[in-house]
Image (cartoon, grey):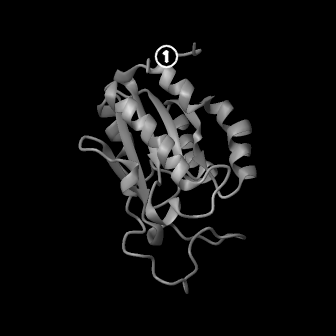
Amino acid sequence: MTDFAINPASTALILIDLQHAIVGRPLAPLSGPQVVAQSVRLAEAFRARGCAVVYVRVLIDEILKLPADTPTTRPPDAPPLPANACELVPEAGVQAGDVLITKKQWGAFYGTDLEQQLRRRGIRSIVMAGIATNFGVESTARQAFDQGFELVFAEDAMTSISEELHRFSVQHIFPKMGRVRSTGQLLQALGK
C-alpha cells in the first residue's frame, strides 16, 4: 500500500538528460544504464496509464558559461563532443507522443516551452528522474516548485557524479519540495 495516488490526467513524468554524453559517465550511487532502465520502467507504466512523459536533453556546448570557482562546463580546449553526445540514448525508449525538451542550462524550464507544454496538458504534478540528481534534476525541480507544481522524486531512478551529492539532495532538499519515493512505490501509486 502506498501513501498517495497518482492522477494520470494531471501528472507528468520528466526524465532529465538520458543522453550519450551523460549516461556513460562515472556516476553514483547508480550507473547511467541503471538509471535509464528504471526510467524506462516508469515511462512505460506512466504511458500505459495515460500520463504525459517528457524527455529533456541538454545542448552541452551551449550551456551558459559564467565565471565560477569550479566550472561545470567543458573547458574551451576540450576535444569536440561526439556527434551524438546531446542525443538521448536509444535505450531511453522515447515514443511518438512523448514531449522532447531541449535546454541550454541545468534547469529545463528557463528558455524552453516546458511550462507551456505542461500547462496545456493540465499537469499539476511532476515525477522527476534522471541525471544528475543535484544538477539537472534539482534545478528543474526548484523551478517547478517555484511555479506551483507538486513534485515527486524517483530516488532510485536518478544518480549523480558522487553518491554524497546524490544523497544530500535526496535527503535534505527534495523532502522540502515534495515526496521522495522508489520506483516500486511510484508504480504502486499508478496502480501497476
Tell me if residue 13 comes above or below residue 109 in the rendering: above
Tally the marks.
Answer: 1
Residue 155 rendering spot, x and y as whole percentages: 61, 37
Q: Nearer the viewer, residue 7 or 184?
A: 184
Q: Quadrant of residue 83?
A: bottom left
Question: Which residue lies at the image location 72% right of the left edge and 44% below the top edge?
Answer: 167
**Residue drawn 55% across and 35% down?**
145
Crowding near pointer 1: few (<14 within 10 Å), some, many (20+)?
few
Q: Is residue 172 left or right of residue 160?
A: right
Q: Secondary structure at mark 1?
A: loop
- What amino acid is found at the position of numbered circle 1 in the picture? Ala
State the quadrant of the C terminus. Answer: top left
Locate residue 26, reporting x and y percent.
63, 63
User: Would you name the residue on which mark 1 appears?
Assistant: 5
Nearest the eye: 102 or 120:
102
Q: Residue at x 62, y 67 (%)?
A: 72
Residue 106 percent location from the top left of the image? 53, 56
Reply above or below: 151 against 103: above
